[in-house]
Image (cartoon, rainbow, N blue to C red):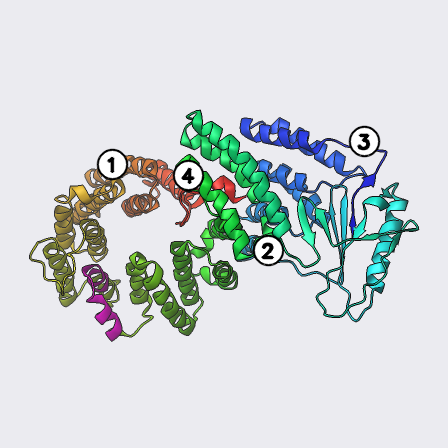
Amino acid sequence: MDSGGFDNVASCLDPTDIRVCISKAVAEKDVGALQRACNSVIQSGNSPDREDLDLYVLCAEAALQLGRAEISKPCLKIYFEGNPPANQFLCRAYLCQGQLECPPATGSAEDFEKAADCFLKAIEVAKTEPRHDSVKLIKFADDTTLIGLISNNDESAYRREVDRLVSWCSGNNLELNAQKTVEMIVDFRKSTVPPPPPSVMDSPITSVESFRFLGTTITQDLKWEPTISSLIKKAQQRMYFLRQLRKAKLPAQMLVQFYTAIIESILTSSITVWFAGATVRDKQRLQRIVRSAEEVIGRSLPSLQDLFHGLVFNASVLYIHTLRPLLQSGRSFHLLPSLRQVLRSLEEVNDPDHDWRAKLMMQLIKCCVDGGKTEEARSLAKVTEEFVKCHTSHLFPELFSLLMQHKLSDRDVLFETSQQTPTLTAIYKLDEFKTLSSVNGDELREEDAGKLQDIFDWLVSAKKPSFPTESDQQPLPPAARVAFLLELAMLALQTKHQKVAADCLKELKTAKEAQSASQRIIMECISVEIRLLKKEAKMNEYSKGSVEARLREIGWLDQWLLNAERAGDPQAVQAVCASVWRLCLPLLQHNLRRSIRGALLRLAQALEDIQRSVAYICGHEEQDPGLML
């Protein structure tokens, strides 16, 4: 049953003005204007003639963007207390709540699980249709819809709820408009006798075959052709203005903005309601509008399928961004249940970003290993390997390194796989060396030192044209070779093998064209560490000269830390911080620590900054983070 509206004598605020005020507050970063808008929403919510719950979500999102959690939290509290319907605003409210619940990096696992629960709820709302009890009441502004599930011809619960709604309206100075109230019965049984319609204020309710609810036409057979035809007609009318703007030679970027605001907003109206049930023919009709707009603008535009599944993807990205501190070893096993659900949801909607799904699958493998579930990790590794080989072959080296590190496959199989490409061979050699018992000891055994030298010799020969490869394989790419040399140099420093570290640095200096800015910063750290190894005996004497020399190296690295922060590369920042910390360790004596206080403070701040602000690797890098709300 749908009630067309309430007649109320009380005045109400115009929601359009409130929405404009919220948008203006965000654009101008005006917290005062946002506070006034929120106060208006709360005051209007106390009026008996409206429950515009969506405005609370808009206020909460705007407050979150402006960093005002004290405004966002009460808005969400009021919204959830209003028993909101399961629509996009409920999904957005859970996304906001998840970000507000996110604790600092030092928070407990329970705090992170609270935030994760919000994101999982958002995913459920976005990907599935909510389950209803026998009778469900849906309220939007002055529209009220009552849904009743009638089993065994028992209408008692449904009719009791109708009577209760009429009684509640009468007791709250509201009058149901019987002329705008209709009833529609959805019944797919072959032989049925329609029940008599209920009455409102002694007037029988009209029974209809379809009715329009919030701009969407719902029919008895649950076909969406009338709704889609209406949307297509509106969109085609607006295509005229897009063509006129094209004739006026507006830039393509402005045409895309016009399309998104005026045409795409029409095509996606209530898309979460009807898209999953639309026929292939209707989807093709809608997509023709998108293709026509692409021809006019001259740029590719997102398909309706991508827009439909966008909420699930955005929720998964926010989930990872928020819970990133829990991805550390020793804590990541807490994410096993929720991360499984996120991956399952992405699979259900067939998310097209295979890179993102592959990275989440590899992260799930790490969580299984962290939780001691080795057999589950092995099983998942096989599934991930098939997925990566089929969709994202460029990520296979990363997966192979994971298999080597945690021994998730047989040694013979790993060795055979490593012979397929030089990149996999390099990964196999380095990871095999890391598993040696003497690598983490005080001194490197002579035979193990020889293996380290063999790896360096292999990497040096990998750049030569005569480098032996199987069949028609290409030699090791220069960029990959630089990355492996850096890793080998760090391993050599860890095992105090000064010669190999120095040889790696010398070889790296000859490959300048393949180096990134962050890699050059890491090379400077290696250079400082090598100088430290050369002077290690003198440095341990704590003479005035040795202390001053160590402080000069710390000052030098302090400048490179600033460069690493400007580059925005967390790996470079961590490498510099590790080198600074190793240099500072001997100076933590009670009479020397004052001289390194500033360096340690900057180190701590740098680590905190990358922990707080660096985004986790994401497949849709071109997507605006603001749209994730």
Real-space CA distance between mark 4 and mark 3, rounded to the nearest whole angstrom: 48 Å
Residue type pointed to by label 2: Lys
Residue type pointed to by label 1: Trp
The image position of residue 346, as x and y in percent, is 48, 58
**Is the C-beta separation of discs 1 and 4 under 8 Å?**
no
Q: Earlier in the sequence, mark 3 or mark 2?
A: 3
**Is the C-beta separation of discs 4 and 2 under 8 Å?**
no
Q: Which residues are magenta?
A: 412-428
Q: Main secondary structure of the magenta part?
A: helix
Q: Earlier in the sequence, mark 1 or mark 4?
A: 4
Q: Which residue is at 27% across, 37% downward?
A: 560
Residue identifier under label 2: 121
Residue type pointed to by label 3: Ser
Q: Quadrant of the C terminus?
A: top right
Residue 193, quarter of picture: bottom right
Residue identifier under label 1: 556
Residue identifier under label 4: 295
Disc 1 versus disc 4: nearer the observer = 4
Q: Which residue is at 31% across, 72% downward?
A: 409
